[in-house]
Every structure is written in structure tokens, then in C-alpha cells.
Amino acid sequence: MSVGAARCFRPYARADASAPAADHAMERTLDPARLGDHLDRLFRAAWALCGSREDAEDLVQETYARLLARPRLLRKEDDLGYLLRALRNTFLNQRRTESRRLRPGPLPDQLDELVADPQARQPQAALEARELYAAVAALPADFRDVLVAVDITGLSYKEAARALRIREGTVMSRLYRARKQVVRRIEVGSG
């Protein structure tokens, strides 16, 4: 087999053989063994996106299933930023799919209050967390994404800007406005 033919069969092979060696140094594959290191942060991010603990578990599971289906090549980015972007894209894809389907009516609101969370150690903390995540999930997408990236996932402004592909100043501006909206929603809900 010729060198050119062998290149066609290698995944992620560069077509440009004269690319600088520095570009290759910045590329690496996502290590599936290290995905568990980010599970807690991704779950919190998913919960903030979905507004529901159960939907968040499903979203993280679906994201990991998609990521593990084939090798992923990372270019000049960290694992968490890439995983957050993959989680967000999976969430948006699910939203688009759900918007095209007929859905039965929701369960009564009282059902959530009657069924206690078995993992909650303090009922008041569970209630506050549910209220907070619901407020974050109700934000417009641009504000929600930034708030999830910085406050829930723990990315720096620079990492969030890179993960969301926006400017760092935009991250700071949206984060400020998103935090104000969450506080306002919680104050209105408890007042």
C-alpha cells in the first residue's frame, strides 16, 4: 500500500504533510479513561441547562455515549472545555428533536413536592438547589451558557470564552447580566 493510500485509512490524518510540527504538538486525542474526572462538573452544568436532575443525568449519559462512540481529537483546548461544548451541543440537539415531537401534558406541580429526593441530606438545601437550577434553566440561552460555564462548571473567563467561542469581555458582560436575572427570579419566586 502506498503512503498516500495509507494516509486515507488513518483517522484524523492531515492532508497537508508540510504542516508545522508545532500544530501536531497541540493536537491530542481525548482520553476516555479521564472522562470520569469531569463527571460532577458536567452533571451540574447539565442540571443548570435542563432544570431537572433526571434530565441532567440523561443528558450527561447521552453526551458520554456520543463522545465514546469514536475517538475525538482535541486541538489547542482542554478536556473540560471540549466536554462542556459537547454537552451543550447534545442539549441543543435534544431540544430540537423534542420540539418536533408531540408531548403529553406535564405531571402536576405538587408531585415534585410530595416525592422527596432520596439523595438530599437536607430538604431545605435540595429545595434551594432545585429553585436555583430552575432559575438558571429559564435564562435565555446566551446567558445560561455563560453562567453554566463559569459559575457551575468552574471555567475561568478565558476558558469559557474559548469553549463557547466568544470573546472574554462578552463572557464577563453576559455573566453579570445572567447573575442579576437569576437573583431577580429567585427573589420573585420566594417573595
Image: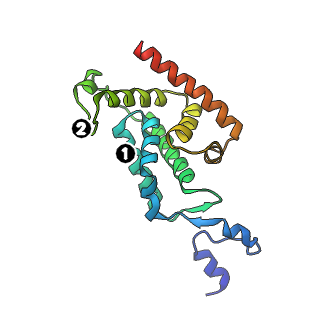
Q: Secondary structure at mark 2?
A: loop
Q: Which mark is residue 118?
A: 2
Crowding at dot 2, Cα within 10 Å, few <14 / some 14-19 / many 20+, comes out as few
Three-letter amino acid code at disc 2?
Answer: Pro
Q: Is residue 168 left or right of residue 29?
A: right
Circle 1 sits on which residue?
58
Q: Residue furthest bottom?
A: 1
Q: Secondary structure at mark 1?
A: helix
- In the rendered view, tell whether residue 75 sits above or below residue 154: below
Q: What residue appears at the point 57 percent right and 45 percent down from the top-left corner? A: 155
Q: Are marks 1 and 2 in contact (CB under 8 Å)?
A: no
Q: Is residue 189 left or right of residue 89?
A: left
Closer to viewer: mark 1 or mark 2: 2
Three-letter amino acid code at disc 1?
Answer: Asp
Measured from the top left, where is residue 114 in percent x and y? Answer: 22, 25
Q: What residue appears at the point 57 percent right and 71 percent down from the top-left corner? A: 11
Q: Residue furthest front?
A: 122
Q: What residue appears at the point 42 percent right and 48 percent down from the top-left corner? A: 40
Crowding at dot 1, Cα within 10 Å, few <14 / some 14-19 / many 20+, comes out as some
- In the rendered view, tell whether residue 143 sits above or below residue 8: above
N-terminal label among 1 and 2: 1
